[in-house]
Each structure stands twice: as structure tokens, then as C-alpha cells.
Amino acid sequence: MPRQRYQRGTLATSVPGNSTRPERKLPRGTFWGQWYQYVRKADGSEGRRREKIITKDLAAKYGIAKDYDGPLTKTDAQRVLEALIAEDTGAFVPPDREATFEQLAREYIALHETSWGPHMALVAKSIIQRHLVGKLGCRPVADLTEIELQQFVNGYVKERASNSLLKKILAHLRGIMKYARKKRLIDENPAEDIRAKSRKRVCERTLTVDECRRMLSVLMGRDRLILRVLIQLGLRPEEVFALRRDDVGEDSLRVDEAIVFGSVAPVKTDASSASVYMPPDLAFELRSWIECSPGESGDWLFTHSRGRGPGGPLNSNNYRKRVLQPAAIRAGVGVTDSGEKDPDGQPVLETDVTFQALRRTCATLFGDRAKDPKTTQAQLPHADPSITLKHYQKSVPQSVKAAAVMLEAELTGDRPGSRETKRGGLQ
């Protein structure tokens, strides 16, 4: 019988020439693979040379390189070659102890992406690529130790990363290393016992009615409308900037999309997909904004102005830095001295106003007037498993309308519903 032998084969970017054919260069992402099938011949010798052109399509048949676009990499081509050898010879192919963290991370994403859902998949892939692959990607997983991984996570703690980010980093780091152990690339999971606690102070900041008025007073047009939606309806920024013109109804706002890392995705949870009641004055201003600004019914409600035609959706980070926080500083809301100086020698001011602070503000101010937590829950479609919003009544309760109109009257200084009788554009 022929002996069972381990082999990795030969991989090249061109087909070698011989007496009957010249050397042939292969296109980028295509490889020539060669291995031996060990069979005993009549003369007592062993071996039969086998070869195969390895392409991206062939890799896909083995479930390899399906998680990225573009040409097949040499690392993945080697994995395909090893699969061909194992299939052809039945020989045992030992685990690739040189497999990198990036390679395992791609396989981990491919295995879990379908169960994550669109919104979570975008977030998870961004965190894995930026924070894990970006810093550990080139390292062989077999070389990563518990001490090294703990020091890696400690670096984020020292940088005052949020508790939410730390949890996601730890969860995916443990998952990738657990997958490496399952593939027998490592004997133990070095990330299993890693711990981290954020040093970033949890902010519970909410704005008072007076602070809200002051911020509204320094903005106008589109930006004032966006701030009103954030304060009065408590939407997340990714939901606000995903609103379309036809989402604005007579007295309700449809929330069924989100902008996540520049891509359109479903809202964060099923409970977040809802029609939110708009009090009269806000509904009037939004409809007036649509009438005064060009666009089709399915276009974005709030857009950036770049070139001709309908613009794209606003970027939440840019809006926070360029509009929201400068407005808070001009209004004197939550302002502190950063201790730094600008090029003119003037102190650089900071503010604690964020999108999260505005969402908490809505929950606090609305809740104080509604008195009933379930009423606030109906107006703010929180993803709280203790209250199943999908079974909540479809009609808007009178208590929701009353609380929303009362808050609007205090913010604008008008009598409740007074703007319903007004005509004309935005004031």
C-alpha cells in the first residue's frame, strides 16, 4: 500500500513551462496548484503528479473567500489547495498553525453574519475590522497569549473606551479565539478569562427646558427642525438622518430605516420600527419644510448640499461636530474649558451635549409630563423587552398627544396647537 504522507503542495502565479508548452502567466487572483497522489505503480515507484488552476469560483465551492470581493488571496488559494489534496488523497491535513488572526476573523464573520441581522452585522463587522483585525490581523493566532490579549484590551481601558465598545470587543475577541480552538489551531482559548472595566464616566446628562430653548434660538431652518425632532421625539441620530420625505404624515412620523456606517439598514430593533406621534407645531413645520425644499417623495428629508440634484443623507458624526455642539457652545449649554488654545490664543470650549443626551432629555421631559411610563414608552419606541410594543394599541393614546403638545408649548412658548391656525413658511 502507498504510504500516507502530509503535503502542502506547490502554489504559483503562473503555469510552469515544459517541453511541450511555454510558461503561462495567470491573471491576478488565479493560481496554479500542484500536488502528488501517492499510488504504487507497476514498477514499484510511488506518486502521480496532479495539478489544478485555482480560481475565486473554485474557492467558493469550498466555502472559502466568500466574505470579500476582489481577487483571491494567496493565503486562501493555499487553503483551497489543501482542501483539494485532502479530497484527492484522503490524507490527513494538519491544522495550519500559521493561520493569521485576520483569516480566522473573516471566517468567524462569514459563519455568524446571517444570524446577526443587517443592523448588528454592520456594527459587528466594523468593530472587528477596525479594532481587532486592524491591530491583531497579521499575527498568527497560535502566537497570541492571554497576557498579550489582556494588555491589548487594557490599552482601550486606558484610552477611556466606553463600556459598550469594550463589551463588543471582548465578545468578538473571545468568539474568534473560540473558533480558532474549535479548528484545533490552539489548545486553549487565551481570551476566555480576559476582563475589562471602562474608566469612562457614564453620562446621565439631560437638558432643561430653558437649555433646549436656548439651543433652538441659535439655530434655524433645517438644523432647528432636526434639533426639534431629536428633543421632542427622542429619535436616534441614525433614524433621524434616514427619514424620507414620505415618512412625514399628518400627525405621525414613520421610522423604519437607519443609516449605519453610511449604509441603509433596518432600525435597531423590531420595537424601534414604529410611527411616532408628532405634535401639531412640529408636524406643521416639517410639512412646510417639505413644501419649501425641492425633492421627490422618496428622497431623504434632511440632506447635505453637494452639487446638483438630491443630496445624500447627513452624516451623524459630522452633524454633531459641525452643527450640534457648536450650537450648544453658542447657546452656553453644558460648556466647559478644554484647557487648550486655538491658533489665535483663545480658549477651546467643549460641551457635554450629545445625541444620547438629547434622547435622555426627551425621555425625561416627556416622562415628567406624561406621568405614565407606558405612555413615554409608546412615544419613544425603546427596544425594551419588558414592554412588547408590537402588541401595543395602534391608535395614539390621548395621554401621548396631551404630553407631546404640552412639551411643545413649553419649548416654543406658544399656546398648545396655536400653529395649526398659522399659515406661511417656517418662522
Image (cartoon, rainbow, N blue to C red):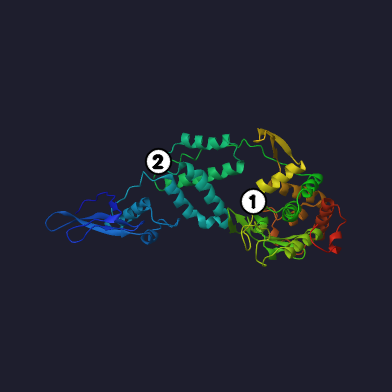
Which-is-in-front pick, marks 2 and 1?
1
Mark drawn on residue 316: 1
Going from N to C along the chain, the mark reached first, 2 or 1, is 2
Mark drawn on residue 68: none
* Residue in the image at 25% along x and 54% along y: 35
- Asked whether residue 194 appears in the rendered view, the answer is no
**If the image is split into quadrants, where does the N terminus sit?**
bottom left
* Residue in the image at 82% along x and 45% along y: 210
Sort mark 2 into few (<14), some (14-19) or many (20+) by Cα contacts within 10 Å. Answer: many
Q: Position of 2 compared to 30: left or right? A: left
Image location (x, y in percent) of residue 398: 82, 60
Image location (x, y in percent) of residue 286: 75, 61
**What element does badge 2 sit on?**
helix
Q: Amino acid at mark 2?
A: Ala
**If the image is split into quadrants, where does the C terminus sit?**
bottom right
Closer to the camera, 274 or 406? Answer: 406
Kindly report the distance in space between the C-alpha atoms of the residues bearing marks 2 and 1: 40 Å
Residue tagged 2: 142
Sort mark 1 into few (<14), some (14-19) or many (20+) by Cα contacts within 10 Å. Answer: many
From the viewer's perspective, is residue 151 above or below residue 302? Answer: above
Image location (x, y in percent) of residue 150: 50, 36
Image location (x, y in percent) of residue 222: 72, 56
